[in-house]
Amino acid sequence: MTGPAELLAPPVTGPTIHRHPGTLAPLEDSWRALVSALPGSSYFMTPDWVLGSWEAMDPAANATAETAVWTSPDGRVEAVVPLVRTRGRLHPRLPLPVSFWTLLGSGADAADHGLLPALPHRHAEVGAWLAGRVRGGSLWLPAMDPEAGPGLLPPGTRRIARTTCPRLTVGPGLPVGSTGFRRLMRRRERQLADAGVTFRWVAPPQMTAEVIDTVLRLHLLRQEVKGTRTAFGPARRAFHLRLLERADGDRGPTALLAEREGRPVGAVYGFLWQNTFAYYNGGWDPAYARLSLGTVLLDRAVAEASALGLDTFDFLRGDEEYKYRSFGAVDRYDDQWLRPRSPGTLLAGAVLRHRRRPRTPRAGTVSGVPGGPSS
């Protein structure tokens, strides 16, 4: 009996190619176990993120997606390459779209810390397969974790940029920011309490579509005040609902809400994965700007992460000053890679290589979604 058309039988030593997300359902737990075992792993590498993005893909985007999976003889997932061939602009300064291959979930959904999850003994095989699969086509990997490992990228793939992704080590008893900052936060919390504002942590099991809608509404309100727009909007609602469907007790979408008389007035939104909370986005009512609600929300989120026993608060991409000045985050980087195979992608590579270099790390730091809060 032949299997579904979307599932192609592989050679004995090669991967199974999945061309529909539904055929990967039996492998999701093993895929998560693989990601959990890898250094530098992130929520953005899990089947939750990748398959959620695939399922929510806009049919009008005219994109072609597939996922290659290598398994052991006993069926354990040992490597995953989730790809999409699409067309778009690699940089706002480039007027024309180009065609390219990239990782599923790295486009409009803005995944950071991407990785081709593979056990070391599969690296050479995965790299050779990927080189053959994208032969003749351009490959763009906008946010690869530096721990990606040798041999996974095809020849001719060059690192063209680095993105700063600050993070903060958290935990019980670890102070956040300066003494003056902590004193200011306690004063602002008292003022917000006097104004009737309370805070509520919403863990993955309690997350609902209503909370997602609240976060989107508050984010849009904040962007209207700033006069900016981000990709985090109503068009991505279906994707975030897909993330809710795959969430578990200690994994998935999480929020900290600020509420007054039962009405949300602020939100921090991110994802729990292993020992990390990744701050993805948020927003708040500008009526509370004078009480520094945005900064207090982040400070409370850091405290909640510590209370949960997490050890990392990941601010994700962007070197906004508040991450360092207020919270004391340290630098970490994602790498951007390009294998150009067309005039358009060659031009994109030239533009991206000349972008602003990463900020110089501050003293004590280690050696790029949301905008920062403002008072």
Image (cartoon, rainbow, N blue to C red):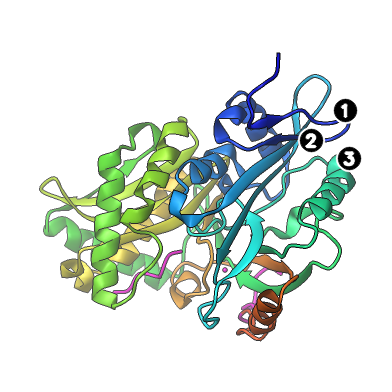
Task: Name the residue carrying label 1.
Answer: 12
Give the structural element (helix, strand or loop) at label 1.
Answer: loop
| 123, above or below 373, in the image | above
Q: Position of residue 59 (x, y in %)?
A: 45, 49
Q: Is residue 148 visible?
A: yes
Give the magenta range.
359-375
Quadrant (top left/top right/bottom left/bottom right) for the N terminus = top right
The image quarter in which residue 136 lies: bottom right
- Residue at left offset 64%, top offset 43%: 66
Coordinates of residue 46 in the picture (x, y in percent): 59, 41
Residue sitting at x 82%, y 26%: 72
Question: Mark 3 is on which residue type?
Answer: His
Q: Residue at x 15, y 68 (%)?
A: 287
| Residue wearing tag 3 | 121
Residue 349 or residue 35, whichever sits in front: 349
Q: Give the labeled residue for mark 2.
A: 15
SS state under label 2 = loop
The amino acid type, in three-letter code, at marker 1 is Val
Q: Is residue 100 above or below residue 209?
A: below
Mark 3 Cα shell of 10 Å, populated few (<14), some (14-19), many (≥20):
few
Is 37 drawn above or below residue 100 in the view shown? above
The residue type indicated by label 2 comes to: Pro
Front residue of 174 and 25: 25
